[in-house]
Image: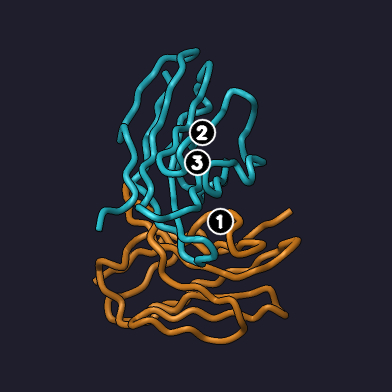
Chain colours: A cyan, B orange
């Protein structure tokens, strides 16, 4: 079956612009996670959804970052007033409830110029 | 807070065995996972230890000692395609997010 998909695969934007990153999880997975990965580092947690609600958003760095999952499937990560420090690969993962394994998408490489 | 320590780089010869260690400090502990990531690719799940002891999956094995806050990933019969970054990760409970280490870059040489 299809894995986790993320669009776009690459996004280049200018400082101060708004961006949206999309994640399509594996069908039936109720848990959805957003991570951010900088070069040479491990993925860093941003926000976690259980169904439609954000169960834990403690990883969001500031109020410029926001994410939604209105129907409990597709999720969108939104970044306002982008800064050069936001440049990274944004990874999405999904899993079944209670599963120890997370399935990651290929990521969106965001570059803020 | 939570922190994980693992070596930044390891080099090993094709056909050999390599062990990647991971020590962790966490406020809560549910289990230790290992993920593999090739350059430009997505992290993929390798192994999970919820209890002390050894878990074996083909050429890969993973070990956990909760009393020592320590685990390792063992890769046997190394192949060139095993060259990748390997991350250990912990979580506080079944559905909480993973906290990843910085990763160990494994280079397999002929």
Task: Return the residue at label 2.
Answer: A68
Is disc 3 surrounded by few (<14), some (14 to 19) or many (20+) residues within 10 Å?
many
Alpha carbon separation for disc pair 3 and 1: 11 Å
* Mark 1 crowdedness (10 Å alpha carbons): few <14, some 14-19, many ≥20: many
The structure residue drawn at horizontal position 56% and vertical position 56%, both measured from the top left corner, is: B100
The image shows residue B49 at horizontal and vertical percentages of 55, 76
Quadrant of the image for the N terminus of chain A? bottom left
- Measured in 3D between alpha carbons, the distance from the residue under mark 2 to the one under mark 1, in whole angstroms, is 24 Å
Task: Name the residue: 45% across, 42% down.
Answer: A39
Q: CA distance from mark 2 to mark 3?
A: 16 Å
Tell which of A106 and B84 is nearer to you: A106
Q: Is residue B68 above or below residue A34?
A: below
**Residue wearing tag 1:** B100
> Residue, x 44% and y 53% (percent of image)?
A94
Name the image quarter holding residue B97.
bottom right
The x and y percentages for residue A98 are: 54, 65
Q: Which residue is mark 3?
A: A36
What label does residue A22 carry, if any?
Answer: none
Helix, strand or loop status at disc 2: strand
Q: Is residue A28 left or right of residue B14?
A: right
Secondary structure of the residue carrying numbered label 3: strand
Q: Residue at x 30, y 82 (%)?
A: B77
Nearer to us: label 2 or label 1:
2
**Same subunit: marks 2 and 3:** yes
Foreground disc of the pair 2, 3: 2
| A20 sits left or right of B8 in the view | left
Of B87 and B48, which appears nearest the observer?
A: B48
Query: Residue under mark 2: which chain is it in?
Result: A
Residue neighbourhood size for the residue with mark 2, other residues' Cα within 10 Å, grouped as few (<14), some (14–19), many (≥20): some
- Asked if residue A34 shows in the view, the reply is yes
Q: Nearer the viewer, residue A1 or B22?
A: A1
**In-image side of B14 versus A93 (left or right):** left
């Amino acid at each position: 079956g299809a894995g986790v998909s993320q669009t776009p695969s690459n996004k280049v934007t200018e400082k101060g612009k708004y961006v949206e990153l999309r994640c399509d999880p594996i069908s039936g997975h109720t848990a959805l996670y957003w991570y951010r990965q900088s070069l040479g580092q491990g993925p860093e947690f941003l926000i976690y959804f259980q169904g439609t609600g954000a169960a834990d958003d403690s990883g969001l760095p500031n109020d410029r970052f926001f994410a939604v999952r209105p129907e409990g499937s597709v999720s969108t990560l939104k970044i306002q007033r982008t800064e050069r420090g936001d440049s990274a690969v944004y990874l999405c993962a999904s899993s079944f409830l209670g599963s120890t394994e997370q399935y990651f998408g290929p990521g969106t490489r965001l570059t803020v110029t | 807070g939570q922190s994980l320590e693992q070596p930044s780089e390891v080099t090993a010869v094709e056909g050999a065995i390599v062990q990647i260690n991971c020590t962790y400090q966490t406020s809560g502990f549910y289990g230790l996972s290992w993920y593999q990531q090739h350059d430009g690719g997505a992290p993929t799940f390798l192994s999970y230890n919820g209890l002390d002891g050894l878990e074996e999956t083909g050429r890969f094995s993973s070990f956990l000692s909760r009393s020592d806050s320590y685990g390792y990933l063992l890769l046997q019969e190394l192949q060139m395609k095993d060259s990748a970054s390997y991350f250990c990760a912990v979580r506080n409970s079944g559905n909480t997010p993973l906290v990843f280490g910085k990763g160990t870059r494994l280079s397999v040489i002929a």
